[in-house]
Image (tube, helix red, strand yellow):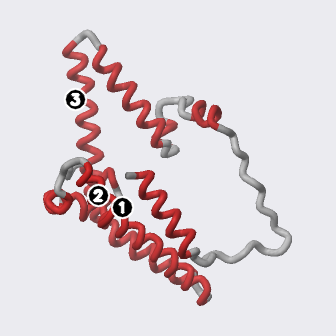
Amino acid sequence: TTYGAALVSCCLFLLIRPRNMVNPLPAGEVVLPMVNHGYWSYLQHLIPTNFFQPFIENQVLTVLMLAVLIGLALRQIPDEAARKTISNVFKGFHGIVTVLTQWLLRLIPIGLFGFITSSVETLHAKHSLLGLGEYLSVIVFANLIQGLVILPLWLRMKGLHPWKMMLALMRPLSVAFFSKSSVGTLPLT
């Protein structure tokens, strides 16, 4: 579904072609090209130099790899009491993250209002406003196609009734829609 969403978004972006919303570079300023490191360098980057680095730098794949490795190692601990203690520590961390996420979801409207206010203030030109509208149309259309076409087809292929699933998951879907946070929906699902 992620690849499908990325493909739909890319096609809509190429079809609508939103105008540039930022001012061009001042005269004489040069943009340096990005360096392509390759696949092997990317794999090496998955191995963190310390345990906290992937969490601080938002390296999702590295965090996922650490979670899988910790889960596998946890299953191999011979002492059941130690295994249960460590499992309870992770359950406690999950509880803390759930509470923090709920607090954050309550603050999102205030942050969103501030973000929109500051963004609108920086949009002075009509060209920028049109570009923003075009960009938002790409996002809205991509979400509609993904939610009303691709996901129902995928559920149907899996033998599930799409509308019954969406009704049953209305609360997590609404949290996901309004917060754009997949982590925020985990406690609800």
Q: Which amino acid does label 2 sit on?
A: Leu
Residue hosting label 2? 153
In the picture, residue 127 is in which quadrant?
Answer: bottom right
Q: Residue placed farthest to the bottom in the image?
A: 126
Q: Which residue is drawn at 23% across and 54% down?
A: 156
Residue 187 placement, left or right of 57? left
Q: Is residue 153 above or below residue 87?
A: below
Amino acid at the residue labelled 3? Asn
Q: Position of residue 59 (x, y in %)?
A: 50, 42
Checking the image for residue 180, the label placed there is 1
Toward the right, the furthest residue is: 28
Give the secondary structure at mark 3. Answer: helix
Q: Where is residue 99 in the image (x, y as percent from the top left)?
A: 24, 50
Number of marks drawn: 3
- Disc 2 versus disc 1: nearer the observer: 2
Residue 11 lies, in percent from the top left, at 52, 65
